[in-house]
Image (cartoon, rainbow, N blue to C red):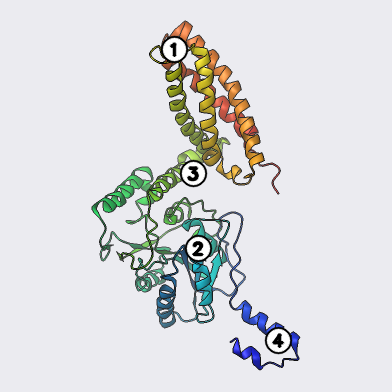
Amino acid sequence: MRNDAKLLNPNDQNLNNIYMSMIDNTNSLLSVPTGSLAIPQDTCKTALLLSLIIPTYQESENIQSIIKILTQIFDDSIPGEYELIVVDDDSPDDTWKLAQSLMPKYPQLQVMRRQSERGLSSAVIRGWQMARGDILGVIDGDLQHPPHIILRMLEAMKKNADLVVASRHVDGGGVSSWSFMRRFLSRGAQLLGLIILPEILGRVSDPMSGYFMVRRSCVAGTTLNPVGYKILLEVVGRGNVGKIAEVGYVFCERKQGASKVTWKQYVDYIHHLLRLRLSTGRLEKFSQSMGFPIGRFLRFGVVGLSGVFVDMAVLYFLSDPTTLALPLTRSKIIAGEVAIFNNFLWNDAWTFADVSAQQRAWKQRFKRFVKFNLICLAGLVLNVVVLNVVFNLILANRYIANLIAIAVATIWNFWVNLKLSWRVTQVK
């Protein structure tokens, strides 16, 4: 195509510029959506049957192969009715650039390069936000998800399924050569999910699958809030999903590139389960009816529990007769301040993460810390008074008295911090 541009009249510079612009546009990157992770109800663009997202990071060794294979499959089965969208998290190995270079050869291919966000789940949703398909799908870019299974998934969708999951745990499914420990962790994670979210994870045999299709209508208008890699949890938990079908597949080992599975993915998975439990169950409905943020309060309580351990440890080290044996009140003040700092870090990163994400500047974070500290110091005064009253007048056990004092101050700390410390202000 570049050679064709030379056939134009060299004296007609305007025409030549327009033509070159048209060529460049055929190879342009998709813009990256911003704001909430909500799927649009419909699209103003020409609708397609299927939009398949390929989230990538450091997949330059695999990207050409998977695009070639998927294109061959779809050109034979649903020609002109699909699109492939590579969403790359600005890979250092230039995966996005290599995929972009393939666009002239594969007209159904589009590429998005994300530079300010990270994470597989959010990458998939950003791709869905730009997609034109009535069916939205996802497949890994490392060829561990066998591409030929996708035809069976499409057939299930045509039989009125709302969601089709490629599963390792139904007939025809399995894993190729996992170690005992990896199998144990996978099954343990599934069991944990069934305990925490039985009504959601009980609907699919492989809730940790990253290979599935869903109808746009089932997730359109819903704001998703994923953690880590397991976006299927969000789709089943928050989407309006009716009929679910499953197709067995064998999870293959990598032939190229390095695995990205680490312990962090299991931590994110547990975090995600707890978040869904708090935001989709009876507690959330009660919270909405009462106008009280119970889910946020419970997160605040979990953080406070970590502060209890910090507080107790420091109090023991400073006041116990077998250690420094400092006066109880002085020890309590120091222990409380250390716990306050611990709690601020966790609350800023988790309990009020939605607000913190909009106020990331260090100046704003410092203001939050000052407010949090002052409010908690007022709570600490209340804490110290209760501690001394209980210890001196009711129960001469410094640790039980300390627990009672902490409990009395917790509600004060949460409510006032909710109203004063974490508020959306001065956002550009």
Quadrant placement of the N terminus = bottom right
Asked if marks 3 and 1 touch (Cβ < 8 Å), the reply is no
Amino acid type assigned to the residue bearing label 3 in the image = Ser
Give the secondary structure at mark 4.
helix
Of the residues under marks 3 and 1, which one precedes in the sequence? 3
- On residue 325, the disc is 1
Q: Position of residue 50 (x, y in %)?
A: 48, 72
Single out the mark in the foreground, 3 or 1.
Answer: 1
Q: Is residue 284 above or below residue 37?
A: above
Q: Nearer the viewer, residue 40 or 31?
A: 31
Residue highlighted by disc 4: 16
Single out the mark in the foreground, 3 or 2.
Answer: 2
Q: Position of residue 304 (x, y in %)?
A: 49, 30
Residue at horizontal 61 percent and vertical 21 percent from the top: 378
Q: Residues within 10 Å of mark 4 (few under 14, many from 20)?
A: some
Asked if marks 2 and 1 touch (Cβ < 8 Å), the reply is no
Residue highlighted by disc 3: 279
Whether residue 131 is visible, yes or no, is: no
Of the residues under marks 2 and 1, which one precedes in the sequence? 2
Residue at horizontal 44 percent and vertical 58 percent from the top: 241
Asked if marks 3 and 4 touch (Cβ < 8 Å), the reply is no
Single out the mark in the foreground, 3 or 4.
Answer: 4
Residue highlighted by disc 2: 91
Q: Quadrant of residue 305?
A: top left
Query: Mark 3 and mark 4: span between their CA atoms?
Result: 56 Å
Q: Residues within 10 Å of mark 3 (few under 14, many from 20)?
A: some
Q: Residues within 10 Å of mark 2 (few under 14, many from 20)?
A: some
Q: Quadrant of residue 246?
A: bottom left
Of the residues under marks 3 and 4, which one precedes in the sequence? 4
